[in-house]
Image (cartoon, rainbow, N blue to C red):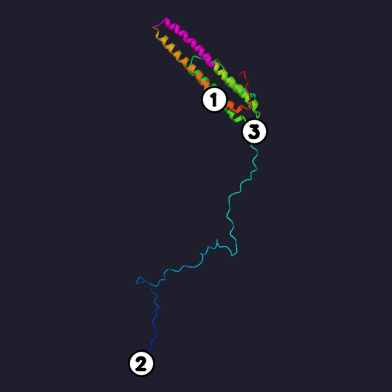
Amino acid sequence: MSLSAARPCAAPLNVTAPQRSAPAPRLEVGGGTRGARSWPPTRPSGPPALPAARRRPPGSVRPPAPGPPPRPKQGPPGPASPRLSRPIGRRRALGLSSMAAPSSAVSCEDFAEFQELLRVMRTIDDRIVHELNTTIPTASFVGKVDASQTCKELYQSLMEAHTSRERIIKNCIAQTSSVVKTLREEREKAQDDVALLKQLRKEQTKLKLMQSELNVEEVVNDRSWKVFNERCRIHYKPPKSQ
């Protein structure tokens, strides 16, 4: 008995070869070949999907964006009015008059002190010019302000200021002229006195400077009267004696 006869024959195995997928189509570009890719790449159609938190139900309306806060309502503008609706008043006029006259006796020995006093006293002209420009009404407000009384008070203040300054200047000129005259007489008696000659020249220089203040005073007064005549020409007529 043979060995093959003793063993039963095994059934042949049915082995199926794996199936190969179809090769991807190739796209020829410029004579070459590329792998299985579509060109250009496809993109999903339609708008991108929003996150769940930002999605709105269909048919809903987007709420309007918040705008700026509303402005408070303003009423209609009132009628225009002049800056000052009344004359400067007696108290204010007295204040201007106190600036025109010095509170103490004027010293003519130091020219720097004398010049500073005049500078302070001349500031009243600047204040009066300011009052003329801001208080006297224009033609549109001529019926709302007593321009005649205001011009009269300012005229009196100007006259007092100019008279006071002129009196001080002329008084110091007279005093200094008297000192120069005395020093000249002493100089004739003592020709060799160097200190006396130095003092004489000092007083002569001071006298010339004081005389020049009269020219400065004339310029300041002319400027003030020019503004006064422009603003008060039709409201007030000064006395002819002035």
Who is closer to the viewer here, 44 or 141? Answer: 141
> What residue did someone put label 3 on?
141
Instruction: Report whether 216 appears left or right of 94.
Output: left
The residue under the point 53% across, 21% down is 218
Instruction: Report whether 225 appears left or right of 196.
Output: right
Question: Residue lying furthest bottom in this view?
Answer: 1
Q: Amino acid at mark 2?
A: Ala
Q: Is label 1 in a helix, a strand or a loop?
A: helix
Residue 231 numbered tag: none
Evaluate whether residue 201 shows in this view.
yes
Query: In front of the other: label 1 or label 2?
Result: 1
Evaluate whether residue 102 shows in this view.
no
Q: Amino acid at mark 1?
A: Arg
Using the numbered discs, state the Cα–Cα distance from disc 1 to disc 3 in whole angstroms. Answer: 25 Å
Residue 37 lies in the magenta-colored region:
no
> What residue did someone put label 2 on?
6
> What residue did someone put label 1 on?
223
Q: Amino acid at mark 3?
A: Phe
Q: Which quarter of the rendering shows the C terminus?
A: top right
The residue under the point 52% across, 16% down is 169
Who is closer to the viewer here, 95 or 179? Answer: 179
State whether residue 77 is above or below residue 189: below
Q: Is the residue marked by circle 1 packed among few (<14), some (14-19), or many (20+) residues within 10 Å?
A: few
Give, as a single range, the part of the protein colored magenta: 168-191
Place of residue 96 in the rendered image (x, y in percent of width and height, measured from the top left):
59, 23
